[in-house]
Every structure is written in structure tokens, then in C-alpha cells.
Amino acid sequence: MRIKLTRPAGVSVRRINTKYAGRRIRALVLSPEDGAENAPGVLWIHGGGYITGTKETVYMTRAVDLVTDHDAVIVAPDYGIAPIRPYPAALDDCYAALLWMRDHAEELCIDKERLAVGGVSAGGGLCAAVCMRARDEGSVKISFQLPLYPMLDDRDTESSKDNHGRIWNTKRNHFGWRMYLRKTDKNNVPPYAAPARQTDCHGLPPCYTFVGRGEPFFSETLKYVSDLRAAGVAAECDVYDTDIHAFDMLYPELPVSREASAVFNERICRIKVFSDG
């Protein structure tokens, strides 16, 4: 598949390259072309199975909708990918970017009381992990999370085992986790590395996500939503009939992708973080 990444219309983009909290932060900042003021701020984390991907793929995701349709400001960081820097490098990089975003809220024209974290695939897994770490450290108030079809569980699930779906499948999933966790004790994998292992979801931010019924991450996505609800956290998930992982960003012309995009924007309009101005 050939992917062309182009800056979306109606979006202003600038690049950040700095050091913060002991990490090198390279990020894109996406904001409405006509400017932002007290906007919701979203840390948006790219996917790639923890083994590949770049911040520029934000241009293909629902994050662009958050800018153009909901006047949000997006901070999309690069992070250490597993073949070069395994866990916890990616989490540390993304968490440092969150702290940078919090401390530069005025410069970014965002409201520190309206911070969210989102991401796709492995970025969705990192989204969940960042929210857990922020809760545990009491460092940042995250008001909402958007982990879309997230990669959460290093163990086989009902949908990730023997899965031959398009884009991502069991073989690739095993490889991604093996690379990401190669310096981690496999008998004691922490929830920050594999958020599906979290046993206490109390105090995590409210959540919205969607996922394809036939893709590997179907079961772990539904379990995460169920675990949040069991802890008293508001969480919703829409399910679509497709086995294509990341279908909305890789095949945006499909009817199912158009439906997911429309429903996503309808859901966002009802979320207080994005509707307050």
C-alpha cells in the first residue's frame, strides 16, 4: 500500500524540536488555520505496532477532524520505536510531550482544563498508558481519552489469536510485542507496557473508541471499555463490520470509513471537553 502524507486543508502546522523533562521532543502542532483561543488540547500518538510509524501520519487520522471541526489544537509527537528503543522509551517520550504541552498551554493557545490524549493502534495503547501514568503520578489532569482500535494486550486474545485480517494480524502482532517488550520481564509485564494488564481503572479519564469486529484488537478494545465502566468511568465503543485494521485512515473512501468518521464527529460534539468554548 502506498501512503501519501499531505498537510490537510484548513490546518496550520508547525514543528517542535526541543528538550524537555530529560527527553528530546519532536512533534507537530496542528491548529485551526484561523487561530485558536482557549482551545481543547490533544496529545495525539501515532500507530505502527510499536515498531514503525511517524508523527506525520497524524494527517491521515481523526485528529484532523478535531482541528477542523472542533477547533482543537493537536500535539503529535514522535517517539522511540521498538527496534531501536524498546519499552519504556515510547511511553517516556509521549509522557514528556504531555508535560511539555501542559507547561506550554498559553503558547499553544489551549486550556489546561481541557486536555485530552488520543491515538491509533499502538498509539491507542500508549494513550491508555499515558493516562494511567498521569493518574498515578498526579501530574496532569487529562479530561478525556480517545484510544482508537488500541493495541493493549501482549497476550493472545480471542480476536488476536489466529487472526488473518488485513493490515495487521497475529504474526505481526507477536512480532510487534516481542520487539517492544524485549527488555521487559515477561513474567511481570507492567500495565504501562501493556495496558490490558491494568487491574485498577478507577480515576482514569472518560473514553471513546471504535474498532472493527474482525480485526485483532477487537477483544482487547471491548475489554478495556468494560474495565473502565466497571470502575465507574464513562466509556463508549462503536463496532464496525470490517477486518481491516485502521480502516478509517487507510481506506477513507470505504462506506464503513465514512460512517466511522461521521459517528466520531457526532460523538465528539457531545463531549464536554470539545464542546465548551
Image (cartoon, rainbow, N blue to C red):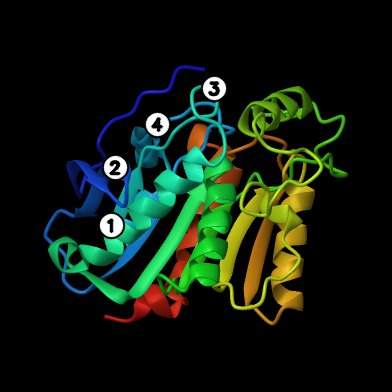
Q: Camera-side residue: 203 or 57?
A: 203
In x, y percent, where is residue 35? Answer: 12, 61
Q: What whole-number distance in Å separates the C-alpha atoms at marks 1 and 4?
A: 19 Å
Q: What whole-number distance in Å separates the C-alpha atoms at marks 3 and 4?
A: 14 Å
Q: Which mark is residue 54?
A: 4
Indicate which label's residue lies in the foreground, 2 or 4: 2
Residue at 55%, 32% in the rendered image = 86
Do we see residue 159 in this rendering? Answer: yes
Q: Residues within 10 Å of mark 2 (few under 14, many from 20)?
A: many
Which numbered disc, 2 or 4, marks the residue that appears first in the sequence? Answer: 2
Mark 1 falls on what kind of element?
Answer: helix
Q: Residues within 10 Å of mark 1 (few under 14, many from 20)?
A: some
66 versus 140 height, above or below: above
Q: What whole-number distance in Å separates the C-alpha atoms at marks 1 and 3?
A: 26 Å
Mark 3 falls on what kind of element?
Answer: loop
Q: Amino acid at mark 3?
A: Pro
Mark 2 falls on what kind of element?
Answer: strand
Asked whether disc 2 touches disc 1, contact meaning CB atoms under 8 Å apart, the reply is yes
Asked whether disc 3 touches disc 4, contact meaning CB atoms under 8 Å apart, the reply is no
Q: Amino acid at mark 4?
A: Thr
Indicate which label's residue lies in the foreground, 1 or 4: 1
Q: What whole-number distance in Å separates the C-alpha atoms at marks 2 and 3?
A: 19 Å
Give the residue number, with chain letter if any, for mark 2: 25
Q: Camera-side residue: 270 or 46?
A: 46
Q: What whole-number distance in Å separates the C-alpha atoms at marks 2 and 1?
A: 9 Å
Indicate which label's residue lies in the foreground, 3 or 4: 3
Residue at 82%, 31% in the rendered image = 163
Q: Camera-side residue: 191 or 108?
A: 191
Give the residue number, with chain letter if any, for mark 3: 83
Q: Amino acid at mark 2?
A: Ile
